[in-house]
């Protein structure tokens, strides 16, 4: 009886039926993490590019249409109309526009004011209308939710209490004479 049991143990030790399964179990999490991070990075890059391009187009329209008054809500609606891949854009986009003197430059604060849907709504940030020949700096911040928060990239992003990360885009233009 004991001899038979030892033979079965030895024959089990020499079998190689499960080697592919072991390799799969070891490598599958790595490839899944790589796949999820690639999708997350691709979508993040797409959203950033659309936000940057739409802000550039809106700023170009502002420069070309001299004399037309610009408002915060008008710029938000135009940017969101052109940035179609940012979900809930009009609620999650915050603009900041300030006048800067190019001869006596003062940087914008490093802390960007963005929306945070887990907190109470914040009013519009600094939004100064410029006079003729004033240099305007327009900064847009959109909060976006990750698709795979547990992926390598999704977990490495700096997120707010709601799990959203910020896409920040800046643009500068000169207020043309009327």
Image (cartoon, rainbow, N blue to C red):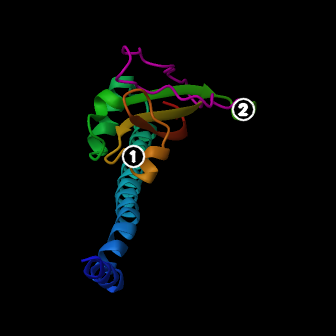
Which residue is at the front of the view, 62 or 1?
Answer: 1
Which residue is at the front of the view, 150 or 147?
Answer: 150
| Mark closest to the chain's N terminus, 2 or 1 | 1
| Relative vertical location of residue 10 with respect to residue 116 in this rendering, above or below | below
Give the residue furthest to the front: 1
Which residue is at the front of the view, 56 or 162?
Answer: 162
Residue labelled with disc 1: 57
Dominant secondary structure, magenta: loop
Where does the image place residue 93, in percent across and percent down from the top left? 37, 31
Q: Can the viewer see residue 71 in this picture?
A: no
Q: How many marks?
A: 2
Residue labelled with disc 2: 105
* Residue at image point 33% right, 24% down: 73
| Relative vertical location of residue 173 with respect to residue 161 in this rendering, above or below | below
* Residue at image point 37% right, 53% down: 40
* Residue at image point 34% right, 30% down: 92
The boundaries of the magenta stretch are 106-134
Where does the image place residue 114, in percent across and percent down from the top left? 45, 27
């Amino acid at each position: 009886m004991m001899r038979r049991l030892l033979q079965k143990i030895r024959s089990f030790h020499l079998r190689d039926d499960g080697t592919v399964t072991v390799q799969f179990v070891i490598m599958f999490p790595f490839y899944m993490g790589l796949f999820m991070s690639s999708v997350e990075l691709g979508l993040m890059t797409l959203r950033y590019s659309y936000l940057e391009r739409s802000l550039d187009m809106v700023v170009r329209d502002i420069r070309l249409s001299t004399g037309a008054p610009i408002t915060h809500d008008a710029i938000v609606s135009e940017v969101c109309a052109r940035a179609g891949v940012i979900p809930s854009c009009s609620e999650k986009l915050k603009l900041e526009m300030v006048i800067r003197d190019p001869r006596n430059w003062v940087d914008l604060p490093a802390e960007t004011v963005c929306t945070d849907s887990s907190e109470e709504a914040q009013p519009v940030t600094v939004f100064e209308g410029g006079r003729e020949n004033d240099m305007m700096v327009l900064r847009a911040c959109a909060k976006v939710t990750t698709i795979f928060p547990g992926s390598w990239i999704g977990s490495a992003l700096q997120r707010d209490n709601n799990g959203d990360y910020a896409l920040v885009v800046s643009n500068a233009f000169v207020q043309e004479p009327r």
